[in-house]
């Protein structure tokens, strides 16, 4: 199962999946050109939500459809340093899709 992690460092923001840089997935939808952010609702957190879901789901259309809800539920509440597992994401998706 994949592990996603984000941190704020002196060199800026770093987001990884299993230790490798997470692709922003601008090819799917470009909310911003400023990369990822979290702890609030906005364009950069939406880009992170999209990238997380696209990588985790392997389903680009579903990732685009769910990214706004996922950003509001999860990404906007992440701490400065965070870790999410595939199981964490699946749990939230189950809640979002059952509404």
Image (cartoon, rainbow, N blue to C red):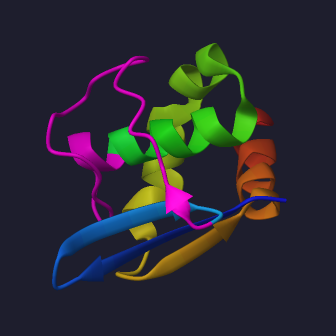
Magenta: main secondary structure: loop
Q: Is residue 43 magenta?
A: yes
Name the quarter where the N terminus is drawn: bottom right
Residue found farthest to the front: 20
* x and y, in percent, of residue 5 in the image: 53, 70
Front-lying residue, 69 or 58: 58
- Determine whether 47 is above or below 39 in the image: above
The reply, left or right, for residue 96 in relation to residue 27 is right
Front-lying residue, 64 or 25: 25
- Is residue 42 visible in this depiction of the protein? no
Name the quarter where the C terminus is drawn: top right
* x and y, in percent, of residue 68 in the image: 44, 35
Query: Which residue is rendered at x = 65% and y = 64% of the image?
Result: 18
Q: Is residue 88 magenta?
A: no
* x and y, in percent, of residue 71 in the image: 45, 47
Front-lying residue, 75 or 15: 15
Query: Which residue is rendered at x = 73% and y = 44% of the image?
Result: 93
Q: Bounds of the magenta span?
A: 19-45
């Amino acid at each position: 199962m994949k592990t996603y992690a984000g941190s704020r460092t002196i060199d800026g923001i770093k987001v990884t999946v299993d230790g490798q840089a997470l692709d922003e997935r601008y090819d799917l939808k470009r909310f911003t050109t400023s990369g990822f952010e979290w702890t609030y609702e906005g364009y950069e957190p939406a880009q992170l939500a999209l990238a997380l879901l696209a990588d985790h789901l392997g389903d680009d259309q579903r990732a685009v459809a769910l990214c706004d809800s996922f950003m509001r539920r999860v990404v906007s509440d992440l701490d400065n340093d965070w870790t999410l597992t595939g199981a964490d994401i699946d749990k939230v998706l189950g809640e979002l899709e059952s509404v």
